[in-house]
C-alpha cells in the first residue's frame, strides 16, 4: 500500500470512531502514520480512544464530540479542522432501524436519514471542496451490502445505504480528475456494537448470514480507495449483490430479502403496523392549543386569503 500520508496528507477524519469499523479504520490509519480527528457522540469514549492510539502509534489526535444529526455539528467539524492538513474523510457514523416502516415516528425516520444520508452527503461536499482545492484527497462512504437491494422491514435503513452507494459511485468520476479518490464501501454484516443491537431483534444465523471482522472491512476499504468506485466486502455478500443486480428482478429481490428478514426476526410483532397507537400526525394535532374556529376563519383558510 502506498504511504497514505504521502498520498493524502497528514490528517484523516473518522466519524463513528470509537467502536466497530470506525475504530478499525482509526487504528489502521494510525499504524500508517496519519494523525486523526476522531468524531463520535460520547466524549469519554473519544478521549479513551485517542489516548490508546496516541500511546501505541505516537500520532496526534483531535477529538470532537458531535451529534451528526445536527447541522451545526456538521459545520463545527468543518470549522474546527480548518487549521489541519486534512486529506482523508472516513464517513462511517451510522444508525440502524428495523421493523415495520409505519411503526416508526417521523422523528425516528428523520434521525436515521440525518445520520446516514444528510451527514455524509454534507461532509462529503464540505471536505470534497477542500480536497479539490488542495489537489488531492480521499473520501470513503461506509455504506452496506444492504444498499444494493430494497429490504422490507429494514426499509428506511436499506434506502439510506443505497443513497451512499450511488453518491460515492457518482463522485468517484466527478472528483477523480481533481486528484480526489472516492469509494463506496459496502460491507456485509460485521461484528460491531450496532449489529449486536440489531441481532437482539433479528437472528441472522437463522438464514445463514455470517459476520465479518471490522479490521478486515477497514483493510479492504483502504486498499480499494482510488482503485474503483465501490466495493462489496465479503464473498457471501458479493454473491447477494451479484444476484440482485444480474439475476433477480428488483421486485423478486425485495420479496426474497423480505422473506429472509421475516424468518430471521425474533419478535414478529415488530413486523406489523402498530394500529392501536396514535399516528405522528394525531399526536401533533393533540398537542396543539385548542382554539375556537369560526366559519369565516375556515373559509379564509380554504380560500388561502390573508
Image (spheres, rainbow, N blue to C red):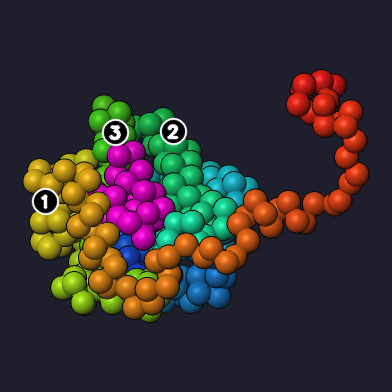
Q: Secondary structure under badge 3?
A: helix
Q: Earlier in the sequence, mark 2 or mark 3?
A: 2
Q: Is residue 80 left or right of residue 223?
A: right
Label disc, if present, on residue 129 of the rendered structure? 2
Which one is closest to the eye, mark 2 or mark 3? Answer: 3
Per the picture, the main secondary structure of the magenta-coloured stretch is helix
Nearer to me, 230 or 48: 230
Q: Is residue 113 left or right of residue 88?
A: right
**Few, some or many C-alpha atoms within 10 Å of disc 1 (few <14, some 14-19, many ≥20)?**
some
Q: Earlier in the sequence, mark 2 or mark 1?
A: 2
Per the image, the residue denoted by label 1 is 243
Q: Is residue 141 above or below residue 189?
A: above
Per the image, the residue denoted by label 3 is 170
Label disc, if present, on residue 35 of the rendered structure? none
Rendering coords of residue 215 (x, y %): 24, 69
Q: Which residues are magenta?
A: 141-167
Image point (31%, 34%), residue name:
171
**Few, some or many C-alpha atoms within 10 Å of disc 2 (few <14, some 14-19, many ≥20)?**
some
The part of the image, by quadrant, that contains residue 186 is bottom left
Image point (18%, 72%), residue name:
207
Image point (43%, 65%), residue name:
272
Image point (62%, 48%), residue name:
72
Q: Earlier in the sequence, mark 3 or mark 1?
A: 3
Amino acid at each position: 500500500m502506498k504511504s497514505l500520508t504521502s498520498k493524502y496528507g497528514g490528517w484523516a477524519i473518522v466519524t463513528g470512531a470509537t467502536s466497530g469499523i470506525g475504530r478499525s479504520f482509526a487504528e489502521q490509519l494510525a499504524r500508517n502514520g496519519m494523525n486523526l480527528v476522531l468524531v463520535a457522540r460520547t466524549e469519554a469514549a473519544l478521549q479513551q480512544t485517542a489516548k490508546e492510539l496516541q500511546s501505541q502509534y505516537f500520532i496526534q489526535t483531535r477529538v470532537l464530540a458531535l451529534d451528526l444529526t445536527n447541522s451545526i455539528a456538521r459545520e463545527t467539524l468543518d470549522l474546527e479542522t480548518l487549521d489541519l492538513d486534512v486529506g482523508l474523510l472516513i464517513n462511517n457514523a451510522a444508525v440502524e432501524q428495523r421493523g415495520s416502516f409505519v411503526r416508526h415516528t417521523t422523528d425516528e425516520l428523520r434521525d436515521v436519514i440525518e445520520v446516514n444520508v444528510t451527514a455524509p452527503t454534507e461532509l462529503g461536499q464540505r471536505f470534497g471542496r477542500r480536497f479539490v482545492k488542495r489537489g488531492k484527497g480521499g473520501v470513503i462512504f461506509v455504506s452496506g451490502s444492504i444498499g444494493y437491494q430494497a429490504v422490507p422491514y429494514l426499509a428506511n435503513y436499506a434506502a439510506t445505504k443505497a443513497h451512499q452507494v450511488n453518491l460515492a459511485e457518482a463522485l468517484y468520476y466527478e472528483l477523480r480528475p481533481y486528484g480526489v479518490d472516492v469509494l463506496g464501501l459496502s460491507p456485509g454484516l460485521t461484528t460491531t456494537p450496532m449489529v449486536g443491537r440489531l441481532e437482539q431483534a433479528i437472528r441472522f444465523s437463522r438464514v445463514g448470514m455470517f459476520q465479518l471482522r471490522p479490521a478486515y472491512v477497514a483493510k479492504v476499504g483502504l486498499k480499494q480507495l482510488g482503485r474503483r468506485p465501490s466495493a462489496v466486502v465479503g464473498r457471501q455478500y458479493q454473491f447477494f449483490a451479484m444476484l440482485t443486480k444480474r439475476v433477480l428482478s428488483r421486485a423478486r429481490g425485495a420479496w426474497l430479502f423480505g422473506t429472509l428478514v421475516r424468518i430471521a426476526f425474533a419478535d414478529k410483532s415488530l413486523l406489523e403496523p402498530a394500529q392501536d397507537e396514535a399516528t405522528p400526525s394525531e399526536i401533533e394535532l393533540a398537542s396543539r392549543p385548542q382554539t375556537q374556529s369560526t366559519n369565516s376563519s375556515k373559509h379564509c383558510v380554504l380560500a388561502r386569503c390573508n
